[in-house]
Image (cartoon, grey):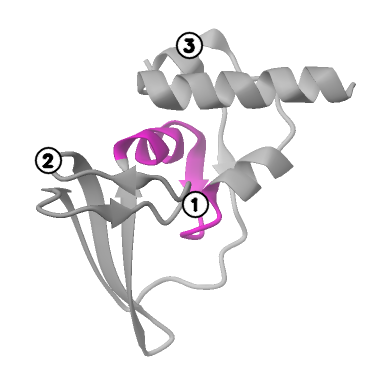
């Protein structure tokens, strides 16, 4: 089932080269999106690319990748949660069901925080 929600971020540009791979951590890493530690043995997304003639590496935990895969049609690395919070749309349960359990908890927490602010 595909989610009907779609966040399209106005990106600064596309990489001239990119290599994406799901890896298993052989040491701890930090997720570029949420800042959590990706522990040894956990899977994560490794992205190497060249943006504006500058080489960059991004390591994303599977929870943040889950959110990006379900909700984003385009994104800027290291801005996932900021961009998610800035978007105003109804999130159907079918979209939430596609997330990893930890990502689901975080998204539901953000929804509840939004209700508390209203």
Left or right: where does residue 23 sit relative to residue 61? left
For residue 60, say whether it is visible: yes
The residue that disc 2 covers is: 41
Task: First in sequence, mark 3 or 2: give its number.
Answer: 2
Where residue 47 sits, quadrant-wise, is bottom left
The residue that disc 1 covers is: 74
Furthest toward the top, the residue is: 93
Q: Disc 1 to disc 2, how far (Cα)?
A: 29 Å
In the image, residue 94 lies at what x, y percent?
A: 48, 11
Q: Residues within 10 Å of mark 1 (few under 14, many from 20)?
A: some
Q: Residues within 10 Å of mark 3 (few under 14, many from 20)?
A: few
Left or right: where does residue 99 sit relative to residue 115? left
From the viewer's perspective, is residue 79 above or below residue 54?
above
From the viewer's perspective, is residue 62 above or below residue 105?
below
The residue that disc 3 covers is: 94
From the viewer's perspective, is residue 56 above or below residue 79?
below
């Amino acid at each position: 089932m595909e989610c009907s929600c779609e966040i399209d971020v106005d990106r600064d540009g596309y990489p001239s080269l990119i290599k994406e791979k799901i890896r298993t951590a052989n040491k701890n890493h930090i997720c570029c999106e949420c800042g959590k530690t990706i522990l040894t043995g956990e899977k994560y997304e490794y992205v190497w690319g060249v943006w504006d003639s500058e080489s960059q590496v991004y390591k994303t935990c599977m929870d943040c990748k889950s959110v990006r895969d379900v909700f984003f049609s385009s994104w800027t690395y290291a801005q996932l949660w900021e961009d998610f919070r800035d978007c105003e749309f109804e999130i159907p349960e079918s979209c939430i069901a596609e997330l990893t359990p930890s990502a689901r908890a975080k998204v539901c927490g953000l929804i509840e925080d939004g209700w508390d602010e209203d």
